Amino acid sequence: MYNTILVPHAGTSAGDIALKHAISAVKSSSAKIILLHVVEQIPRPPMFALSSSEQKKLLKNIHIADEDFRRGMISEMEKRVKICDDNNIKASITVTIGLAADEILKIIKKQKVDLVVMAKRRKLKGLKSLLTLGSVSRKIVENTACPILLVDIEKNE
């Protein structure tokens, strides 16, 4: 039924639980899992107070830090790919730099994702619980036609 499943993963236990659900969903198929981690860009400060050379140096240092985070998360995600390998499931890693919701939506489109499996953590009571998802979850739900499985982490821990 599904060929490509996207698991946005922040390198946390919540992401690991979502990955377990994705593995269960594809165990008896030839589907592949894409593990996606988005490194949030380090905010750029206002540049008007800096000289041109200071701006270049600052931007270079921010870029180096972004890339260091990205490489570190590739290493973290490789541990999760091993879990997929141990279950005879094809998996790949994508680590990007940007805003999480925007990057997830790009990957859904680019990779022709059939299902997104992601963790949902926020617990609210009353009417707010019906109206509120996390900002990333909400943006994904509102901007893609792809089926989404939101895993309630508190019920799965």
Image (cartoon, rainbow, N blue to C red):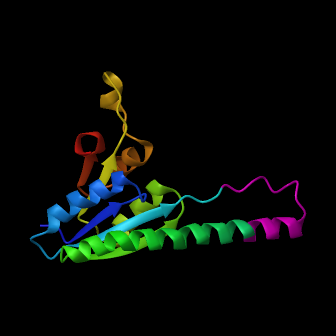
* The N terminus, quarter of image: bottom left
Residue 69 in percent (x, y) is at 57, 67
Q: Nearer the viewer, residue 91 or 80?
A: 80
47 to 88, vertically: above or below: above
Snapshot quadrant of residue 115 = bottom left
At x 60%, y 60%, the residue is 41
Residue 45 lies in the magenta stretch: yes
Residue 68 lies left or right of residue 30; in this view the side is right
Residue at 31%, 53% in the rendered image: 118
Q: Position of residue 28 (x, y in %)?
A: 9, 71
Q: Is residue 56 above or below residue 121?
A: below
Q: Residue at x 37, y 37 (%)?
A: 122
| Left or right of residue 133: residue 62 | right
Quadrant of res 67:
bottom right
* Residue 117 appearing in the image: no
Q: Which residues are magenta?
A: 43-60
Left or right of residue 116, residue 42 in this image:
right
